[in-house]
Amino acid sequence: MNESNKYYLDELKEEQKIIYRLLENTKDSVQRGNVHDIASHIGLLKNGFTAHIKKADKIYGDLLKTVEEKSIKMVAITIDAFSAAMKGIGERVVKFFDKYPDKDEIARLTMEFNRDFENVCEDIMKRVNNEEKVLYPMYEKHCC
């Protein structure tokens, strides 16, 4: 793997650590019921997560192109399926952010927010864990 691509993966892994921290900070604020802090953390989480998925999605394209050029059909099929599943997770998370754009909506829909936040935490963790366990190793093995 060339240095540029290794740096890119390292950058994505650092972003994931930030996303984990933001999730934990948001969970703490939810437990305390501090709507102002929740909204602040959700805003940071939204920005961090959406930027991260745009960068991570580039890897899917690069990896798919490489394995198709090398005619590694099973890996290409796996990447397509994995990409579709991760896209679904990304869409659900973005809908969550759109549903709760500010502290007023969070306060107005507190019970619903708490349930939705639990679900979005699971989705984010699933995406990040799958990237670490599946996407990044495939990228390191087959790309660049």
Image: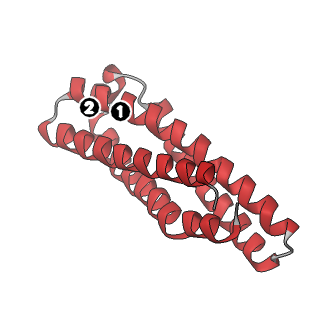
Q: Is residue 64 left or right of residue 100?
A: right
Whether residue 76 sits left or right of residue 98 in the image: it is right
Question: What residue does disc 1 label?
Answer: 42
Q: How is the image coloured?
A: secondary structure
Label 1 Cα crowd, 10 Å radius (few <14 / some 14-19 / many 20+): many
**Which residue occupies 35% across, 49% down?**
17
Q: On screen, 70 above or below 65?
A: below
Q: Dot 2: within a 10 Å radius of its alpha carbon, few (fewer than 14), some, or many (20 or more) residues?
A: many
Residue 71's disc is none
Residue 23 image-quadrant placement: top left
Q: Residue type at mark 2: give it.
A: Ile
Q: Residue 78 location in percent, x, y? A: 70, 73
Furthest residue in direction bottom, as rendered: 74
Taking depth in this image into account, of 65 and 96 the one nearest to the observer is 65
- Residue 38's mark? 2
Up/down of 120 relative to 99, above or below: below
In the image, 40 versus 118, the foreground residue is 40
Could you say where residue 5 lies in the image, as x and y percent from the top left?
61, 52
Amino acid tagged 1: Ile
Q: Residue, x 12% and y 37% (percent of image)?
A: 32
State if disc 1 and disc 2 touch (CB < 8 Å).
Answer: yes
Residue 91 seen: no
Instruction: Tell me what residue is drawn at x 56 percent, y 45 percent.
Output: 53
Q: Nearer the viewer, residue 75 or 118?
A: 75
Location of residue 90 in the rendering, given as x and y in whole percent from the top left corner: 56, 48
Q: Marks 2 and 1, Cα distance to the nearest angstrom?
A: 6 Å
